[in-house]
Structures are given as structure tokens and as C-alpha cells.
Amino acid sequence: MRKMSLAALLVLIALISACSKGGSSTSAALKDDAVASINGITITASDLDSAIKNQMQRIDTQIYQIKKQGLDGLVQKKLIEDAAKKAGKSVDDFMKEEVDAKAVEPTEEEVRALYDARKGKDTLPFDKVKDQIIAFLKQNKKNKAEQDLIAKLKSESDVKIYLEPPRVKIDVGDAPSVGPKDAKITLVEFSDYQCPFCKRVRPTIWKLLEDYKDNLRYVFMDFPLSFHQYAKKAHEAAHCAGDQDKYFDYNKKIFDNQTALSVDDLKKYAKELKLNAEKFDKCLDKGEHADDVNEMQEKGVAIGVSGTPAYFINGVQLSGAQPPNAFKEIIEEELKK
């Protein structure tokens, strides 16, 4: 079956909404909140909302991202136009001076260094790709100059963004966390201990906690994926370590040893952290925290999480192994409110 495009789905939603406002003899015969009936069995609007909740949340996020990208472009355009006007120049002349002029020709050393860094056994000879490397480096310099210019203009201007992102309410319960519970920013991660992308973001998470200190609370939620055979037991093991006040020490130990997560390995890591081995082994063998892991995963599914890592910053979703700036952009916006 072909998947419906986002644009087509939005049109369909609009048509459904328009039709429902007009009313019809068929809909009037049904209950007020009914959207269909089969042999006298009613499907209500709430049934439909529940069934498509996850898809609609993803669409809401996509719509916001499209609007945000468009708004960012409009803001940048206005900043550049105002700056050019103050400088008494046309936009083209202003950009040539502030951006194009800084995209200088790369040196032979820069070109050679990039070639050597990317060189492999199937790489073409240097002379064959030199012009492409030069064009690539010049474009990078131009992009960097433009980014620096926009950042400078923003810092010198009173820019306020009123577009609100969709937010998801998450019941984190007693999930393991770092940072004060009354922090201005709560960063929730749904993660999988066998997920390589989750591991990739570890340095970013700990650096964010260092940079934002009392303003940031980080919450770790279990979301072991079904095709990772050792993940679920690893998540249980972390909670067993948490019973001995070593949750995040063990959390780090697991991510550092992501390719060795058998039950014997998990027990070995507990000993390395000097936990009470007898207590830990009993907890793990009896699956004392299996229900806790399942409950966290169910909470993730309920709000539309389907893969890892999935982040929510004050309820604003950020999916995948994102770079530090992606987190910081949202955090900084939240701190301004």
C-alpha cells in the first residue's frame, strides 16, 4: 500500500473537518460523537483520536518544523535587509562584503589535508578531485561566514519568536534522573542500552548537564527495542544497581561496554562498581524490575515514541542522535520564557 504524503493527509484532514461542519442526514442519524457504525456498533471520535494519536503527534511536529524553518528564513531575511539598509547598501552588495569576501580560496595545505583525511584505497588521485575539494572548502567557508553574520545580527537585535512548538506531557514517575526536580528545563530521554545512536549522544548529555547545572534535569526512560536481545535485561540491571544508589554509574558502565551485555557481563560490571553482588544477582535473576522497564516503555509508546534515542525538552520532541546545538537551541529558547 502506498503511504499518504503529509500534504495529502493535511488536505484530507481539512476536508473531513469541513464536511463535519456542514453536517449531513447520515451524521445526524448517528450519535453526536460518532464517526462510523458497523452493525449498530459505534466508533466514536475519541476512539479515532486514540487510534491515530501517535501519527497525529508526528504530523504536528512535522508541521511545526516546516513552519519553524520558514520562520527562521523570514527572520534572517529581515535581519539582513535591515543591516544592509543601515549600511547604505543593497542586500547583494552587503552579502558580497560580509559573506562572499570571506569565502577565500583555500590554501594548498587545506586542500591536501582534507584529501589525506578522506583518502581510501578507492580514492581518485589528488589532481582528479582537487577542484571539487576547493569548491567544497569555499562553500563551507561561505556557509560559516553567513552563520556568523546571522548570529551577530541576532545578538544586536531584539528578536522574539512567538511560534510555539507542540508539547507532549510525560509522566516520568520515579524514573532515574540527574539535576533538581524544580529545574527550569527537563530533558527526558527514551533510550536503549544496545542502541549505537544512543551511545553516540552520551558526551552531549553529560556536557549539557555540566553547562546548564541547576537549570537542567535529565530523566532516563527505558525503551529497549525488540530486536536488541540483551537490551531489556540491561535496563533491568541498571535499576538493580539503582537499588544500591549506583544507577547512573551503572548506566555509564553499560554504554561503555555496549557490545558485551550478557547476564554474566552485567553481573561482572556490578562487581566492578563494588555493588553488593548477592543482592544485585538476586534482583537481576528474579526480574525484580522487569515491570518498571515495561511501564516506562509503555509510556513512550503512548506518546508516539517508536525508536531511540527520542528526546523531549520541556515536552518539545527532538528525535535521533542530534548534535549539541540542536539541544541548546531548544534549551535557550525555553530559558528565555
Image (cartoon, grey):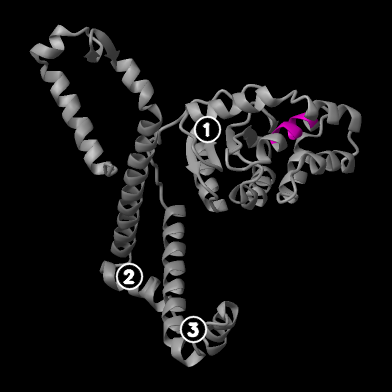
Q: How crowded is mark 1: few (under 14 residues within 10 Å), some or many (20 or more)?
A: some
Q: Answer with left or right where residue 261 lies relative to residue 62.
A: right
Q: Position of residue 301 (x, y in %)?
A: 50, 30
Which residue is found at the position 39% from the left and 38% from the top?
61
Measuring from the top left, give residue 15's x and y in whole percent: 16, 30
Q: How far apart are marks 1 and 3 (CA)?
A: 43 Å
Q: Do the residues labelled 1 and 2 touch (CB within 8 Å)?
A: no
Q: Pointer 1: what residue? A: 314
Name the chief secondary structure element in magenta.
Answer: helix
Q: Residues within 10 Å of mark 2 (few under 14, many from 20)?
A: some
Q: How many marks?
A: 3
Number of the label disc, if any, that sits on residue 106: 3
Closer to the chain start, of discs 1 and 3, is 3
Q: What residue type is labelled 1?
A: Asn
Answer with left or right where residue 162 lies relative to residue 250: left
In magenta, the rendered stretch is 235-240
Above or below: residue 209 compared with residue 196: above
Q: Do the residues labelled 2 and 3 touch (CB within 8 Å)?
A: no
Q: Residue furthest bottom?
A: 127
Q: Is 226 in the magenta?
A: no
- Name the amino acid, label 3: Pro
Q: Please tell me which residue is depicted at 24% across the width and 14% down the height of the picture.
A: 38
Amino acid type, label 2: Phe
Q: Residue at x 37, y 33 (%)?
A: 55
Could you tell me if residue 229 is visible in this image? yes
Q: Residue 292 falls in which quadrant of the image?
A: top right
Q: Mark 2 points at which residue?
A: 94
Residue 133 lies, with reference to residue 144, above or below; the image says below
Identify the residue shown where x is 57% and y is 52%. Answer: 324
